[in-house]
Image: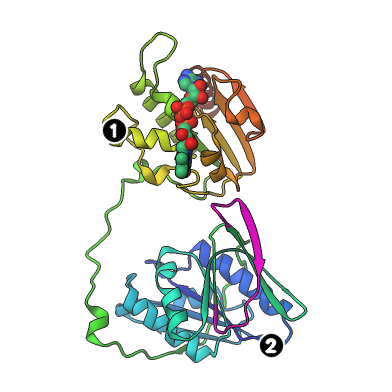
């Protein structure tokens, strides 16, 4: 028998993000699968009332909250204090939370304070014979492991995108406030504001149906002996605008910037996919001008349908890394694709 706490912070508009609703779905499924294991909701943020109402019908035995201006912004000391108070008040043995940057930062520390354990990047959660088993990937998504733990409280932090989101009608929520007294030392850090790219310059879109990956080939000399980087920029930008795809990159392409070579101006290391980059979860992926080497394609582990355009018929994509390889000039292919997309949009 466990006491399961679904723990979440509110977003700036007071709502719960999709990753939080995914964690709630997993927590609820676990509570249903483990006989006599109640689900408790624990929320923190500036004002939690609308978030509480949104999840009021999830079947939780109670909704606990730490609320106030001190808990509005992401800050280790106050986030950890809120999470600790909620876990203690709930008497939680299992804490299920989403792997947002805010929670990934503080929950391992909270687990240590409470004498428990934390596992991050969890992608699967199951209960059988009264035991909870979690799954996660190791060695840059090459091996999957399943394990259980005896230590409690056990903080299970789920990778966003790995679980179906909880869906349910909003309702009337009775929120029990948990008081947290903060020492001044917990408030030394202040958030001055956010600096982020303009909406149309934001090329990383985790929820996009398509991942478009650009490789170093876009910057290489082409058949006419010249490079065509401005053309590459234009084609890629246009494709992203037309499809709202997320933009990924090979390491070679993002590294070129550091070497002083001509590169695509809207790429940074944050776009890098692969062993030392990201492992996104898009239903489909299209790679262009990339060789499809193992350290790159390992980042495609969770992309369901993979296609690639490369001039090289012996590239990695042709060796089992892609479902479809178009051996073709990506400049010509993408120009044609954009033309078709534009005429489809105009039709
Ligand atoms: C420890 C380690 C970690 C690494 N981690 C990563 C990682 O996280 N991510 C990553 O990406 N790499 C990583 N790498 C590097 C990786 O091994 C490759 O070097 C890199 O992925 C190559 O990038 P690329 O395919 O874009 O470039 P290239 O190897 O230069 O390939 C360019 C391709 O473009 C094609 N091309 C050129 N012009 C056209 C055209 N007009 N139309 C179509 N195709 C064209 C060429 O035929 C070629 O196949 C790592 C390497 C190491 C050693």
On the image, the x and y values in percent for residue 81 come to: 37, 83
Q: Which quadrant holds residue 325?
A: top right
In the picture provided, is 20 more to the left or to the right than 241? Answer: right
Looking at the figure, which quarter contains the N terminus?
Answer: bottom right
In this rendering, the label closer to the viewer, 1 or 2: 1
Asked whether residue 96 is in view, the answer is yes
Can you say whether 217 is above or below 24 in the image?
A: above
For marks 1 and 2, the one nearer the N-term is 2
Tag 1 residue: 259
Indicate whether residue 50 is drawn in magenta.
no
**Mark 2 closeness class: few <14, some 14–19, many ≥20 residues within 10 Å:** few
Tag 2 residue: 1
**Mark 1 closeness class: few <14, some 14–19, many ≥20 residues within 10 Å:** few
Indicate whether residue 139 is drawn in magenta.
yes
On the image, the x and y values in percent for residue 137 come to: 59, 58
Q: Name the residue at the front extreme.
A: 139
Can you say whether 308 is above or below 145 in the image?
A: above
Residue at the (53%, 89%) spot, across then down: 90
Range of magenta residues: 138-154
User: CA gap, disc 1 to disc 2?
Assistant: 57 Å
């Amino acid at each position: 028998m466990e006491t399961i706490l679904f723990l979440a912070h509110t977003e700036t508009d007071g709502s719960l993000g999709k990753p939080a609703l995914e964690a709630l779905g997993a927590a609820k499924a676990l509570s249903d699968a483990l006989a006599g294991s109640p689900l408790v909701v624990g929320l923190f943020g500036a004002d939690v009332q609308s978030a509480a109402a949104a999840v009021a019908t999830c079947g939780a035995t109670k909704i606990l909250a730490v609320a106030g201006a001190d808990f509005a912004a992401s800050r280790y000391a106050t986030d950890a204090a809120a999470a600790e108070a909620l876990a203690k008040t709930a008497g939680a043995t299992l804490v299920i939370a989403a792997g947002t940057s805010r929670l990934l930062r503080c929950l391992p520390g909270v687990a240590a304070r409470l004498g428990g354990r934390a596992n991050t990047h969890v992608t699967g959660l199951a209960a059988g014979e009264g035991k909870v088993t979690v799954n996660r990937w190791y060695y840059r998504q090459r091996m999957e492991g399943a394990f259980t733990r005896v230590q409690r409280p056990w903080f299970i932090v789920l990778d966003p995108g790995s679980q179906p989101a909880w869906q349910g009608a909003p309702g009337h929520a009775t929120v029990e406030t948990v008081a947290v007294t903060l020492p001044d030392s917990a408030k030394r850090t202040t958030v001055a504001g956010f600096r982020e790219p303009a909406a149309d310059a934001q090329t990383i879109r985790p929820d996009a149906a398509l991942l478009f990956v650009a490789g170093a080939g876009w910057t290489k000399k082409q058949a006419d002996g010249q490079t065509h980087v401005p053309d590459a920029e234009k084609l890629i930008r246009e494709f992203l605008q037309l499809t709202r795809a997320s933009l990924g990159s090979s390491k070679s392409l993002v590294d070129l910037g550091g070497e002083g070579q001509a590169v695509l101006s809207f790429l940074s290391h944050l776009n890098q996919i692969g062993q030392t980059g990201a492992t996104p979860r898009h239903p489909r992926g299209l790679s262009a001008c990339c060789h499809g080497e193992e350290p790159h394609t390992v980042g495609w582990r969770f992309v369901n349908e993979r296609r690639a355009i490369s001039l090289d018929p012996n590239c990695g994509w042709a060796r089992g890394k892609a479902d479809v390889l178009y051996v073709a000039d990506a400049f010509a292919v993408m120009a044609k694709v954009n033309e078709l997309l534009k005429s489809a949009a105009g039709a």
